[in-house]
Image: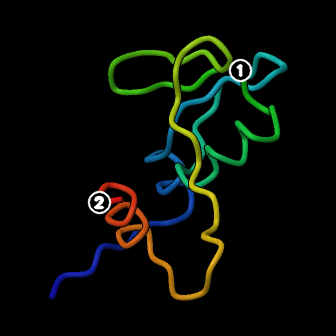
Amino acid sequence: MTLLAIDATELVCMGITVIFANGDERKVPSYMLDYLIREQKIVAFLRSDGWVQIGRDPIRKSQQPLTKAGDRWNDFMFKRSHT
């Protein structure tokens, strides 16, 4: 097995480019995107097909926690499509 040695700066470089509310453009780790959108910290982010402006362009909604113990997203979607 081959292991890759990367540091934290390389991980950030592999992230998503965003524009913060103050106009700064930076790369952030992809796991931070939902948080930044929810907290209104960014005004846009870069997808492979171009810039997405928050509040203007469609974006997916973040997943909400399931309400019952033992539920899984696949179970939930299966039940919805067959009821």
Q: Position of residue 37 (x, y in %)?
A: 70, 36
Find the distance from the CA under tag 2 to the CA under tag 1. 39 Å
Mark 1 is on which residue type?
Answer: Val
Question: According to the image, label 1 marks what residue?
Answer: 43
Q: Quadrant of the C terminus?
A: bottom left
Taking the spot 50% from the left edge, 66% from the top edge, the residue there is 7
Q: Is residue 77 above or below residue 25?
A: below
Q: Secondary structure at mark 2?
A: loop
Where residue 33 sits, quadrant-wise, is top right
Q: Earlier in the sequence, mark 2 or mark 1?
A: 1
Residue 28 image point, x, y percent: 60, 44
Q: On the rendered structure, is 48 left or right of 63?
A: left
How many marks on residues?
A: 2
- Mark 2 sits on what residue? 82
Q: Nearer the viewer, residue 43 or 28?
A: 43
- The crowd level at tag 1 (other Cα within 10 Å; few <14, some 14-19, many 20+) is some
Query: Contact (CB < 8 A) between labels 2 and 1?
Result: no
Residue at the top extreme? Answer: 56
Q: Is residue 33 above or below residue 51?
A: below
Q: Nearer the viewer, mark 2 or mark 1?
A: 2
Q: Residue at x 56, y 62 (%)?
A: 8
